[in-house]
Amino acid sequence: MELEQIFFWLLAFGAVFTSVLVVLPPGGKNPIFGALALIVSFFFVAGIYVLLVAHLMAALQIMVYAGAIMVLFLFVIMLLNLSRRELGEESKTFTQGLGATAMLVIAIKAIVLVEATADGISKRDMALSDGFGTVEAVANMLFHDYLFPFELAAVLLLVAIIGAVVLAKRTL
């Protein structure tokens, strides 16, 4: 088994394990723990993107999902101002496990980075186009091949925003 396959299985197991922690206790009882487990899961998925030589997707995964979206989720959770009884008991073992998982992710990413720069991943024989994974290639595919689904998603988001504003105004 190659080193890349070992990293893939470790990252895949980590992504599945932390995704399960989102819905099962203690993540299922405490929404903050669930959101933190989801952030760690997003980092595992970004690691899989790095293994697939999709560095732009890995960066977008971290910036958009682990950054902006999860900050929004945590902001909403904090605004709910749930009591400690409603949230459930705090679990030190979960926090310690989450810390250990984060350390494992950092270690795996460091090893992958070292391997990539030391003749590992960067010299694989792959049939990729010259612009594979660049912002220009992604934009061309998005706005040429997938223009209709992109516009449909934009309209759906606009309708959701208008609906949220209408519902918020109605409650005030």
Image (cartoon, helix red, strand yellow):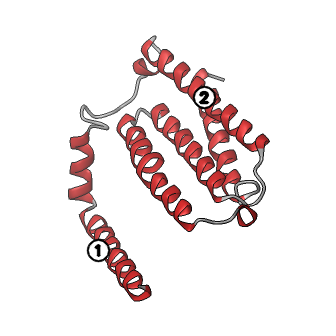
Query: Is 169 placed above or below 18 here?
Result: below
Q: Residue 51: image x %, image y %? A: 49, 31
Q: Is residue 41 left or right of residue 93?
A: left
Residue at the (47%, 20%) spot, across then down:
113
Q: Amino acid at mark 2?
A: Phe
Query: Is 159 placed above or below 32 here?
Result: below
Residue at the (34%, 74%) spot, across then down:
161
Q: Which image quarter holds the N terminus?
A: top right
Residue at the (60%, 48%) spot, across then down:
36
Q: Marks 1 and 2: which is nearer the front?
A: 1
Q: Is residue 25 left or right of residue 47?
A: right
Q: Is residue 138 left or right of residue 123?
A: left
Kindly identify which numbered label has been placed on residue 7. Answer: 2
- Number of other residues with Cα within 10 Å of mark 1, as a class: few under 14, some 14 to 19, many 20 or more: few
Q: Residue 54: image x %, image y %? A: 39, 37
Q: Amino acid at mark 1?
A: Val
Q: Residue furthest bottom?
A: 170
The answer to which quarter of the image holds residue 134 is top left
**Rounded to the nearest whole Å, what is the CA distance between mark 1 and mark 2?**
39 Å
Residue at the (33%, 68%) spot, across then down:
153
Q: Which image quarter holds the C terminus?
A: bottom left
Cβ–Cβ below 8 Å for labels 1 and 2?
no
Q: How many marks?
A: 2
Q: Nearer the viewer, residue 169 or 53?
A: 169
Q: Nearer the viewer, residue 23 or 166?
A: 166
Kindly identify which numbered label has been placed on residue 155. Answer: 1
Q: Is residue 66 left or right of residue 9?
A: left
Query: Is 158 placed above or below 127 here?
Result: below
Q: Residue 166: image x %, image y %? A: 36, 84
Q: Nearer the viewer, residue 99 or 129?
A: 99
At mark 1, the secondary structure is: helix
The answer to which quarter of the image holds residue 131 is top left
